[in-house]
Every structure is written in structure tokens, then in C-alpha cells.
């Protein structure tokens, strides 16, 4: 896979995850006064990093020859395209007397952060395609 394709696929995944984060944060804000509601967050980057690290380790690591499918594999490579974002509930904290742990101001700031990240990602994707257009013209 060439670097352009990989970059575009990563940017598309990041845009999808950002969209999911926006939905989760909007749900948190909508339920900020519901008793015993627990806020959710989206976990993606740490799992993606683990997949990239597994690829790197497999390339640099010690290689064993497997003569039988029942033999253990030393380096299990996780394909980064198989990594999916996960919604994680925060059960450990309680911010209000009614058992709710959503801070509406923090969630509003999170929405702004998500919007800025989305704009940045779309600009990065536009830049990638601009480089290809430049290369085709010359």
C-alpha cells in the first residue's frame, strides 16, 4: 500500500471517529441532568497506536519458522484497518448529587475541540489531494 492511500484511509477513519465523538458528546450534553446518567467517551487512538506498534515489532522482532499451524506465533500483527472506535462509560466518577457525572461546560468545550479537529482533518485531506493534483499537472 502506498503512502498516499494509507494517509487518505487514516484521515477518513479519523473523520469517522471524530463524527462519532461528536454524537457521543452531544448525547452526554443532552443527558446532563438525567439522574444516574454516566458520560461516555470514545477510545480509538490508543488502540490504533497498539496496532501500529505491533506492525513495527513484527518487522524488527525475532522471526520464528512455523512448520505447523498449531505452532505459536511469536509476533501477532494487528491490522490497523481492523481497529474500531469503542464507547467507554465512566462509571467511576459522580459529579452531582443525583449520580450524574456530566459536566455540561466541559462537554461544550469538548464539542469545540472536536469541531476544530474535524476542520484540521479536512484541511489535511485537502492538502493530500492538492499534492496529487500538482504532481499530475507537471
Image: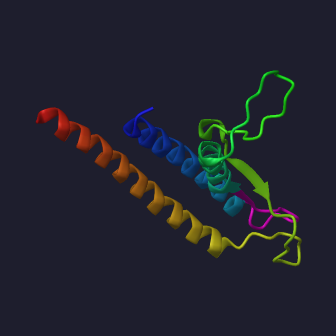
132 to 102, vertically: above or below: above
The picture places residue 103, in percent across and down from the top left corner, at: 71, 73
Residues drawn in magenta: 31-41
Residue 19 lies left or right of residue 71; in this view the side is: left
Quarter containing the N terminus: top left
Residue under the point 61% across and 43% down? 55
Residue 96 lies left or right of residue 58; in this view the side is: right
Residue under the point 61% across and 41% down? 80
Q: Is residue 37 magenta?
A: yes
The residue nearer to you, when weighing 84 against 74, is 74
51 to 111, vertically: above or below: above
In the image, farthest residue toward the left: 138
The picture places residue 120, in percent across and down from the top left corner, at: 40, 57
Q: Quadrant of residue 38?
A: bottom right
132 to 52, vertically: above or below: above
The residue nearer to you, when weighing 100 against 34, is 100
Quarter containing the C terminus: top left
In the image, farthest residue toward the top: 68
Q: How many marks?
A: 0
Q: Is residue 49 magenta?
A: no
The residue nearer to you, when weighing 87 against 29, is 87
The picture places residue 106, in percent across and down from the top left corner, at: 64, 73
Residue under the point 67% across and 42% down? 84
Prevailing SS of the magenta stretch: loop
Residue under the point 82% across and 22% down? 69
29 to 81, vertically: above or below: below
Instruction: Name the image colouring.
Output: rainbow
The picture places residue 26, in percent across and down from the top left corner, at: 63, 57
The residue nearer to you, when weighing 56 against 86, is 56
Amino acid at each position: 500500500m502506498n503512502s498516499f492511500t494509507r494517509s487518505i484511509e487514516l484521515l477518513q477513519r479519523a473523520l469517522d471517529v471524530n463524527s462519532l465523538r461528536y454524537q457521543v458528546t452531544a448525547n452526554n450534553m443532552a443527558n446532563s441532568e438525567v439522574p444516574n446518567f454516566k458520560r461516555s467517551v470514545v477510545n480509538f487512538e490508543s488502540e490504533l497506536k497498539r496496532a501500529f506498534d505491533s506492525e513495527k515489532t513484527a518487522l524488527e522482532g525475532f522471526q520464528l519458522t512455523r512448520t505447523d499451524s498449531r505452532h505459536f506465533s511469536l509476533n501477532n500483527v494487528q491490522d490497523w484497518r481492523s481497529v474500531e472506535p469503542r464507547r467507554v462509560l465512566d462509571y467511576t466518577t459522580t459529579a452531582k448529587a443525583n449520580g450524574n457525572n456530566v459536566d455540561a461546560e466541559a462537554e461544550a468545550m469538548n464539542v469545540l475541540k472536536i469541531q476544530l479537529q474535524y476542520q484540521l482533518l479536512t484541511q489535511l485531506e485537502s492538502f493530500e489531494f492538492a499534492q496529487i493534483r500538482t504532481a499530475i499537472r507537471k
